[in-house]
Image (cartoon, rainbow, N blue to C red):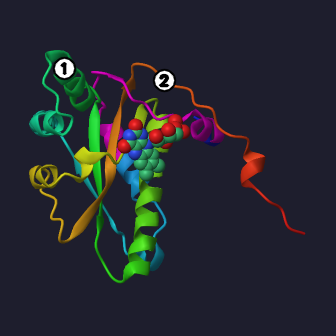
Amino acid sequence: MEFFETVFGRRTIHNYLPDPVPTEVLDKLLSAAHMAPNHKLTWPWRFVVVGSETRQRLLPIACELKKATSPQVINKIREKLLNPGALIVVTQKINGDDFRQKEDYAAVCCAIQNVMLAATAEGFGSKWSTGGLTQHPSVCDLLEIDLSQETVAGFIWVGVPKSTPTIDRPPLDGHVSYLD
Ligand SMILES: Cc1cc2nc3c(=O)[nH]c(=O)nc-3n(C[C@H](O)[C@H](O)[C@H](O)COP(=O)(O)O)c2cc1C
C-alpha cells in the first residue's frame, strides 16, 4: 500500500472479527515499531504480545472494572478482549529525569503509530487504548510488567475489522499557521 493511502486509510477499529493475525505480520509490525526515532538512543519501548489464554484471564478484571454482571455485557467484553487477532502491550522503560521520560514517551508513541500504520499497510485494523484496564495493577501483574521499571503506554489491538468507523476531522487550516 502506498504511504499516503496507508496514513489516510488508518482508522481506530473498535469491533473485530475473530480472525488471527499471522505471526509473520506480527513480526513485521514489531520490526516497524523498532524503527521509530528515539533521542539519545534510549530504545525505551518494550512489547508484550498477549495470547488468548492470558487475555481470557483479563476478562474477570475487565468485568469487575465495568461492574458487568449481565451475560450480554460480559459477552460483549469477552468479544472485545478475545476477538482481535493480536494484542500488543507497549511499555516504556523508566529511565532518567522528567525531560528524558517525556522524550522517551514521545519515542514510544512513534513506535505505536508505526505498528498501527504497518497494520493498515498489511490490511489489518488496529486500536490504541489507554483505558482503566491498561493501567490496572492486577493486569500489570498478569502481564509480568514491573511498574517500578516501566509504565504502560497502551494496548494495541490488531485484527480484522468487523466495521470501520468514520470520524469528522476538523479542517486542517484551523491547526496551521504560516509565518513569513
Ligand atoms: C494516546 C491515545 C489513547 C487512546 N485511547 C483510546 C481508548 O482508550 N479507547 C478508545 O476507544 N480509543 C482510544 N484512542 C483512539 C482515539 O479515540 C482515536 O484515535 C480517535 O478517535 C481518532 O480516530 P482515528 O484513530 O480513527 O483517527 C486513543 C488514541 C490515542 C492517541
Give residue 102's quadrant in the image: bottom left
28 or 107: which is nearer to us? Answer: 107
Q: Which disc is residue 117 wearing?
A: none
- As for residue 153 lying within the magenta part, the answer is no
Residue for point 75% across, 49% down: 174
The segment highlighted magenta reads 4-27
Pointers 2 and 1 in contact (C-beta within 8 Å): no
The kind of residue on which mark 1 rests is Asn
Q: For numbered disc 2, what is the local secondary structure?
A: loop
Please rate how many residues cluster around mark 2, counting C-alpha atoms within 10 Å: few if below 14, some from 14 to 19, many from 20: some
Q: For numbered disc 1, what is the local secondary structure?
A: helix
Can residue 77 be seen here?
A: yes
Extreme residue toward the bottom, this view: 97
Can residue 28 be seen here?
A: no
Residue for point 45% across, 70% down: 38
Query: Which label's residue is closer to the chain start, 2 or 1?
Result: 1
Residue 50 coordinates in the image, percent (x, y): 19, 43
How far apart are the alpha carbons under marks 2 and 1? 21 Å
Residue for point 15% across, 19% down: 70
Tell me if the residue at label 1 has its CB under 8 Å from ligand 1: no
Please rate how many residues cluster around mark 1, counting C-alpha atoms within 10 Å: few if below 14, some from 14 to 19, many from 20: some
Q: Is residue 136 above or below residue 12?
A: below
Q: Quarter holding the C terminus? A: bottom right
Question: Circle 2 sits on which residue?
Answer: 164
Residue 49 coordinates in the image, percent (x, y): 23, 46
Question: Circle 1 sits on which residue?
Answer: 75
Residue 55 coordinates in the image, percent (x, y): 16, 37
The kind of residue on which mark 2 rests is Thr
